[in-house]
Amino acid sequence: MSLRTAEFTALRAAISARGTTRIVIAATSIGIWAALTAVLVLFSDLPLAVLIPFAILVAGFEAVHALHVGVERIGRYLQVYYEEGPDAPQWETAAMAVGPALPGGGVDPLFSALFIGAAVLNLAAAFPVAPIWQELAFLGVCHAGLVVRIVRARIAAARQRTAELDRFRALLLRQRDRN
């Protein structure tokens, strides 16, 4: 097997593995978050204790985001460096050309609504303990920060394909000019 074929095979495998891992991490994060939140609602009398499951949400989202960004970057690399020519593989090029097939844009690779919904519920979990306003303000800022992060990541992810495709094409042209 040539180095080029081995690289292509390894990168396609990485896309597949990272895509599956992203789903597992999202589901696991939400499951652990839900269990911790339930325990805290039932047994805790500290409003700031909701920061423990909140940390799970943050870590889960950041892992999902990092995996998604990596998968997209690999996809654009493959599209530019491997899919030129009529007999070349065309999956990345075709998938990008088709775009979202479902009304409303299709699936959300970052699970944004899921993580935002969990963040809202996580903040609500502090209310049964009657937090003082300072605790509530602190928790509100933390949770709002996560929501802003998720929204910004979603906006960046929507632009990533086109931006990185342009960057890889420019890089390839510079490489060809040097040779």
Image: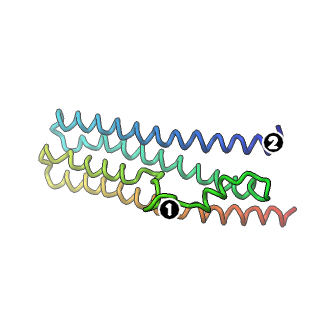
Dot 1 alpha-carbon crowd within 10 angstroms: few under 14, some 14 to 19, many 20 or more: few
Query: Residue 162 in the image: x percent, y percent?
Result: 60, 65
Q: Circle 1 is placed at which residue position?
A: 156
Query: Residue 67 in the image: x percent, y percent?
Result: 53, 46
Query: Residue 48 in the image: x percent, y percent?
Result: 23, 44
State the quadrant of the N terminus: top right
Q: Amino acid at mark 1?
A: Ala
Question: Which SS class for mark 2?
Answer: helix
Relative depth, front residue between 80 and 64: 80
Is 74 situated left or right of 69 in this image?
A: right
Query: Residue 103 in the image: x percent, y percent?
Result: 44, 61
Q: Circle 2 is placed at which residue position?
A: 3
Identify the residue at horizontal 48%, vertical 51% (top origin). 109
Identify the residue at horizontal 29%, vertical 38% (top origin). 34
Relative depth, front residue between 44 and 111: 111
State the quadrant of the C terminus: bottom right
- Disc sitting over residue 14 in the figure: none
